[in-house]
Amino acid sequence: MTTFHASRGRRRLVTLAALGLAVTGCANQEEPPRKTGAKLEITRDPAFYEGREIVLPLDAYAFTEAQRDDFTDAVHALSGACMKEYGLSWPKVAGQKSPVTGNSRRYGVIDLPRAEKFGYGVPLPDGMTHEEAQKVGRANIDRTRKLPQKTRDVYTGENVKQFGGLPVPQGGCRGRAYKALGAPPQGMDSMALDTLRYESWDQARNSRIVLDAVARWSTCMSKAGYAYKTPEEAVADTAWRREGTAPTAAEITAATTDIRCKRDVMLVEKWHSVEVENQKRLVRAKAKLLGDLERRRDALVARVARAGSGT
């Protein structure tokens, strides 16, 4: 389940060199579709900067948010029943779902409407204040930290083989829940797919097309008063590091300037187009691996559904 945790912190870009600076854009004129090879054509698409979902070929092999939620609920139910056998209980995750899901920040902070409200910070669930978000974050930490160590040990299976005269299963009650669902010891294992997804992202990020776009983005930012060579360099800036407080006007100006520069130089269109081609090649090259991952995912989803229905 994707929930908001204040402790996850915020992805921040950009120190403000000039407060309240208005941005008119670095390349407002329309650009024709760009051909970057025999097959790849890139067209300006403002919807990328207005919150449109980003879809990639490898997404077809991943667990959906709903499937992850169902798995989390099934594990909680099965492990909770196990804990009761020892006279113990395990709390459920507190909080509300974050609006940041899937690939929404794969290419950095690009959603202009959200940046106008949250700056570089992670958007909060609808209706939640920053103070409430802090409370949720603390609750998620405290929910297990304040439990007796033995309770945590029975849940995870660490440092304990028996409790109350009963043997503790390998991996604890959580491990027993995973086993009942046919999941590996680490739960929903997506490492192989995540490796491919990172590979495609990294290759696209370092492609000539994207490097050129990043250089143009940097020029645009420089004209607006911000001295950053890359979006990653801006992310490392500590100027916007804050917890539990609303963004300042300066942060919002910086974040919206950043996104408008990305839009002007078509950074996301280019990055996404290159990565789509990279992932298509991976789908062909890793067909057997991806087929195996897809079958294992579908089997796990089916077992979770049966557990949820009690069959």
Image: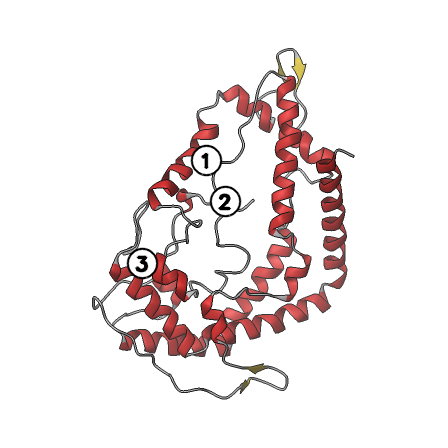
Quarter of the image that includes the C terminus:
top right
Q: Is residue 73 left or right of residue 122?
A: right
Looking at the rendered structure, the secondary structure element under dot 2 is loop
Q: What residue type is disc 1 on?
A: Asn
Residue at point 48%, 54% (across, down): 100
- Write down the residue under mark 3: 237
Q: Are marks 1 and 2 in contact (CB under 8 Å)?
A: yes
- Write down the residue under mark 2: 3
Residue at point 67%, 67% (across, down): 282
Residue 6 image point, x, y percent: 40, 43
Name the residue at the right extreme. 311
Give above or below for 271 relative to 34.
above
Q: Are marks 3 and 2 in contact (CB under 8 Å)?
A: no
Q: Is residue 192 left or right of residue 245?
A: right
Q: Residues within 10 Å of mark 3 (few under 14, many from 20)?
A: some
Quadrant hosting residue 265:
bottom left
Looking at the rendered structure, the secondary structure element under dot 3 is loop
Name the residue at the top extreme. 165
User: Which of the pair 76/166 is nearer the observer?
Assistant: 76
